[in-house]
Amino acid sequence: MTRPFSKFPLLLACLILIGLDVPPVSAQTEAPDPAEAADLPGFGVWGPAYRLRNVPDGMRLVVRASGNRNSATVGSLTRSASEVLVLNCFPEIVPLDFEDASREAKREMLGGVWCEIDHYGMTGFVPGIYLDPILDR
């Protein structure tokens, strides 16, 4: 009489030999590397980099700690700032709607929100009306 699990080691060995890719247990429980997560392709409002628009000559755009004009200032951006990364917008912009929108429609969607941004390590919030997607990438 054969024991029910006597063929299990042989089956496991066959699966390993035919190239079954089983990640190690440690790889299944580790959190993703933040540096790798930042390399994911963008989508919606998070897709393109942004440059500033609507900032008057000689002025800088104030970056705030939260999405309102009464919030503390964390820094400012020059009028010519570009490569601004949008992390999130409030109220949220529907990603598919933003993806499918024309340049003018995107500007209109951004006009009514506050966006959390990152510009070379400075993070904070700016009114979306000052952001312009860089689409020629």
Image (tube, grey):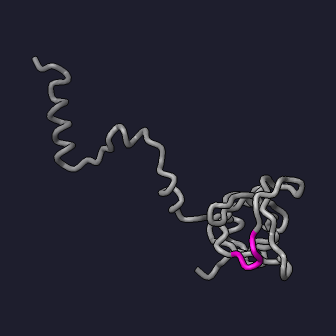
Taking the image as drawn, is residue 106 in sight?
no
Horizontal relation, residue 37 to residue 46: left or right:
left
What percent of the width, then of the height, locates residue 103? 73, 78
User: Which sits in the foreground, 119 or 32?
Assistant: 119
Residue shown at the point (68%, 73%) measured from the top left:
50
Residue shown at the point (15%, 25%) measured from the top left:
6
Q: Is residue 84 above or below residue 64?
A: below
Q: Residue furthest left?
A: 1
Horizontal relation, residue 107 to residue 96: left or right:
right
What percent of the width, then of the height, locates residue 61? 80, 69
Q: Is residue 40 above or below residue 48?
A: above
Taking the image as drawn, is residue 81 in sight?
yes
Quadrant containing the N terminus in the rendered view = top left
Q: Is residue 79 above or below residue 72?
A: below
User: Which range of residues does the magenta coloring cover?
Assistant: 77-81
What percent of the width, then of the height, locates residue 89? 74, 58
What percent of the width, then of the height, locates residue 31? 48, 44
User: Which sits in the foreground, 19 or 127?
Assistant: 127
Quadrant containing the C terminus in the rendered view = bottom right
Residue shown at the point (70%, 75%) measured from the top left:
81
Horizontal relation, residue 65 to residue 2: left or right:
right
User: Which sits in the foreground, 122 or 46?
Assistant: 122
Which SS type dominates the magenta stretch? loop
Q: Can you tell which quarter of the image residue 11 is in?
A: top left
Number of dots carrying numbers:
0
Q: Is residue 96 above or below residue 51?
A: above
